[in-house]
Amino acid sequence: MCHYVVMPRLIDHEARATEITEAAWRVLVRGGVPAVSVRNVAEEAGLATASLRRSFPTQSDLLVACLALLEERVGGRIRALPQRDALEWAIDAIAETVPLDATRRVEMEVHLALGAAAFADERLATAFQRSLQGLQRLSEQIVAMLAPGMPPARLRRAALHLAALVDGLALRILHGGQPRDAMAVLREHLRALAGESA
């Protein structure tokens, strides 16, 4: 007599968490932070509420996961950029953080919504501050590449100036500005940092 052993179906928890977080992004973009409830995200992801709660018990958990996925995707694209001329690498790296296509536009909308929500959510605020520090480090890396030997205090100010410029350009694109114009302004600023003529 044959005995069949039924193996339990293995669940890829990391993939499931990513699917849930992507569903939370869609809910967030459509309805804003208030719409990101466990119930709404479970429905969007096609899961039972109880199943989703095992991974993300609260709205705060979902929002922090949304930010983590954003950092992972943008950071992954920047790390994958080929090594090349410092100025061109800097432009390409910053371009990954700016809403130049549909994917990056969604990412920017998620980033802005989470930034606003962070004022009322302590856990999200802590995570968002770490995210901003990561962007500041990217700006400092770029300034150091383009203007080697710049004194540390001046480098920090130049990096803050660059980060603020990128934030403003990204917001302008999001509200209908021309990406080509924004990137021309960015290139001009980076050339000036590198001591090149425009």
Image (cartoon, helix red, strand yellow):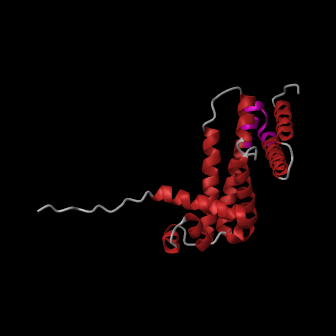
Query: Does any portion of residue 55 appear in the rendered image?
Result: yes
Q: Position of residue 89 (x, y in %)?
A: 70, 32
Q: Position of residue 32 (x, y in %)?
A: 73, 66
Q: Residue furthest left?
A: 1
Eyeballing the image, is 180 above or below 130? above
Q: Image quadrant for the C terminus? A: top right
Image quarter (top left, top right, bottom left or bottom right) of the N terminus: bottom left
Instruction: Say which of 136 and 74 sits in front.
Output: 74
User: What count of labels does the image hold?
Assistant: 0
* Magenta span dominant secondary structure: helix
- Image vertical order of residue 23 relative to residue 105, above or below: below
Residue numbers of the magenta segment: 139-155
In the figure, is residue 8 to the left or right of 33? left
**Residue 26 belongs to magenta span:** no
Q: Residue furthest right?
A: 198
| Residue 6 location (% of width, % of height) | 27, 63
Image quarter of residue 58: bottom right
Q: Position of residue 64 (x, y in %)?
A: 62, 62
Residue appearing at x 78%, y 40% in the figure: 155
Which residue shows up at 63% across the image and 69% down it? 60
